[in-house]
Amino acid sequence: MKPTVRPEPQSAPAPPSDPASDRTRERRTPLWSRRPAVGPQQAAALLAAAVAVLVCCAADAVARSYPFGPRTRNVSDLGNQYVPFHAHLWDLLHGRADGGLLVNWQSGFGSSFLPDLGTYLSSPFALLVVVFPRDEIDLAVYVITVLKTACAGAAMAWLLLALRPGRWWAAGLLGASYALCGWSVLTAAVNPMWLDGLVALPLLCLVGEWALNGRRPVLGTLIVAVAWIANFYTAYMATLGAGLVLALRLWLSGLPPRRRIAAASRAGLSTVLGIGLAAPLVAVVYFGTRHAHPGRVTQFRPLATAYLLAHLLPTSYSFSSPAVYVGTAALLLALALPFHRAVPRRVRAGWTLLVVAVTLSMRWEPTHLVWHAFATPQGSAYRQTFVLCGLLVISAWTALSYGPPDLRALGAAAGLLALITAVAAGSAPARHSFTLPIALLAALAALAGLALLGRADGGWGMDGRLCTALAAALLLGGQIGEATATSAVATRARVTHMDNHVPWGARQQTQSEAIAGADDWPRYRTEPGREQTVGNDPMEVGGQGAQYYSSLTSDVLSRTLTALGDGWTSRGRNVQSLDNAVTDALFSVGARVHSPPDPHQTRFPQDGSRTTVTRQQAPPLVTVRPSGAGTHGGRTDVLAFGPSPYRNQELLLGTRVYTVPRLTVRTGDGTVPDRSDDWRPGRRLEALPDATAARQPTITARCRAGSEVYLWAPYFSGTARLADASVHGPNGRFRSDYPVTMIASMQRLGRVPASGQLRIDLAPDRPSLVPDGAVGCLDTGRLRTAVERLKATGATEVTVSDGTVRARLPAGSRGIAVVAAPRIAGWRCATGDGAAVPARDYHGLIAVPLDGSSTSLTCTFHPPGLRLGTAVGGVALLGLALLGALTAVRGRRAAARSTTTRPPARAGARPAL
């Protein structure tokens, strides 16, 4: 018996639409329930970006921080490194910098710039500095920081809706939660290059989604490349995090093993090709770290559990802790996920276990090292925290996308949050009087909003729309309030606990104008001066000096300048200016700026001095020394230096110009202090915060009358004054906290009186040490003679263009041509028409042997790793081209197959759009 086939019922034609009725219905539909005109993903991204910008600006206004108040935001490395580097980028883009992409001639007497570019300035956002005035460089960095934060929120909101459909406004709020996570507002806000990793994580997860679905392989590869170019350090962490997300998505996909392997292979290919495209920059940065001064070595110590949990709460703050705050609503949703019965059990278990595993990986040293590329970081120790914040937000969206958690799941989440708060309440990050009240208010708002959202899903009519409106208002208002408070607390706490620097103002403008008036590079260098404003004054205010602060400060620069009596901070990575007549001659410094102490730094009182410029005769940038005067072939070697910086300066100069007298050190009561009991030879001094002139320790010695007195005391902290000198000037100030981070620079104190007997009064402000041979008396007449000789035999003409130095030498020049620049890896030199060979080393400076047959010298700089990176990048570009061609061919074949197999259209049927 044949089954009866019933004809399908014909639906009645829809009545014609009334435009007026449609407009009325649209007006009655509330915004939170209306489909956005720009598409849900675009609307969510815009909402996340808007909330992020609003909170960033509101928090700084509440904290009265720049640019909304008088409090500076240039704390620590933001003021010392990142703002000056952006200022140098501004100069490069406007053609005003001394140097180019290869060599920065303004810092460290000539430093490799491409590794710094890849570390601090390779983000596409950094190019925005070009549209700001030079004296608004601080505002430019602030705008870039806020813009990166907004883009991170937009990217996360876009990703969430790509993972699972749901309410667009909820995705926008969770995207903002990610952008305003604790790591972002506490740590990355003053390390703006790390914010590129915050943007990269959701984008790389999106690349994984495309690989899972076999879509956009070329675009995915380009996103990986841009992420690794923007900041390879955090991009590495983001790549690890995106790989974990993809692995979980593959496990939850239910695909057969063959298709899972294919998807993983597509993702791996995009990642490898993308990193390959970034290789020209990444390789240069890698080799730059190999040649950098090692800096401080830190030991990993896992953080106490209470500290970790405390950072889940709003307004918690402590330096070098994993700031895992993501907002109370997002945290509640993530905590509710394991108990949300509408979510498949496999999905609940997968995301929960992934969050727990990443959290535990931050507390175990081997996995902690994996996150940080197998090197324990200096400073902030939990730089991978943004990955955990991203996973928490994705887990929260996973819970919400299956529908709001029921009261059972919300109750369990509230109980866990209460337990977290109880455990964290006694820890230092949560000890603010306002932390617990704000956390309680935020929890109440989030719980009420999520409960109302659950009721809206179960109700109909006006009641459901009203509940949705109230839920959205509570969640949005609570998030803005707690995030603003958290960011404001962090902004104020940073200024209190970290060294800080004022933005561009009258002091920097005066220095810049003084330098511009004296500058005549490359005929001679103009030093910005000893009294620094930030750690990179030459890049901020101009000139060409010794001062340089970077994670990539070369080892040869730090060791050479230290041997010559220079001081440093950051364990040798922030070398300072050395105000010394001999080193000025060695490095062709013809003008030097002298500024009063920075009034923002209150360690020493103001002395009433003004910004002045002194000039002196200086040899050319390229000089000629006798043969066999201490060169080392093809390598950098400063081991020939001895313990005395005065003798080391003479070694480089080639002439004896100092008298290093026997000295006597006495305490305030006239006794000889004890000798040091460690490897540093010298006399120990105790701190005398209330010292008077009668009780001050003293140094006495005899020198030739009229010679200049210098004091080299790298482990002395306080002030030193030459007795009977009318003005001791600003150079009597020493700063050292050895062995923590800094040692003091050699200082000029004045001239020896006619009696030949000199006395130096000391006022140590902490336990200090005066080394043997601390005093040097400079014979300025002998120095002038040495300078005249170097000028007479040195280059007659020197030109400098980015990574190339050309010099015209006197006919018949024999011996060694010495370029007054550190012999960093990458320099190659040639004389005449000869082939370029690796430059030799003259006690840390560039050296080239001369045989008398050539009158020209050319040295060129090639950053180590650039050739290798370019080769890898070329191969990756070829691979990308092949991938694009293969994708296009497959697309055309698929389109042809769909055309030939498509059934004929029925008469009167409309074509599919």
Image (cartoon, rainbow, N blue to C red):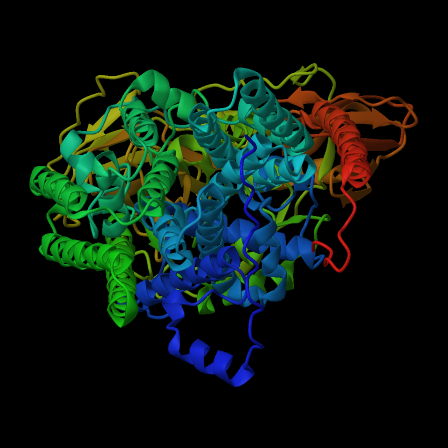
* Residue 542 image position (x, y, % from top left): 59, 55
Q: Residue furthest front?
A: 1
Q: Is residue 198 above or below residue 54?
A: above
* Residue 513 in the figure: left or right of residue 622: left
In depth, the one of 398 and 374 nearer the eye is 398
Q: Which picture quadrant has residue 26? A: bottom left
* Residue 686 image position (x, y, % from top left): 16, 34
Count of marks overlaid on the render: 0
Residue visible at 64% across and 56% down? 91
Q: Is residue 516 visible?
A: yes
Residue visible at 49% across and 58% down? 40
* Residue 174 image position (x, y, % from top left): 36, 51
Residue visible at 45% across and 65% down? 507
* Residue 411 image position (x, y, % from top left): 12, 44
Q: Which quadrant does the C terminus fall into?
A: bottom right
In depth, the one of 104 and 230 nearer the eye is 230
Residue visible at 53% across and 42% down? 203
Q: Which picture quadrant has residue 884? A: top right
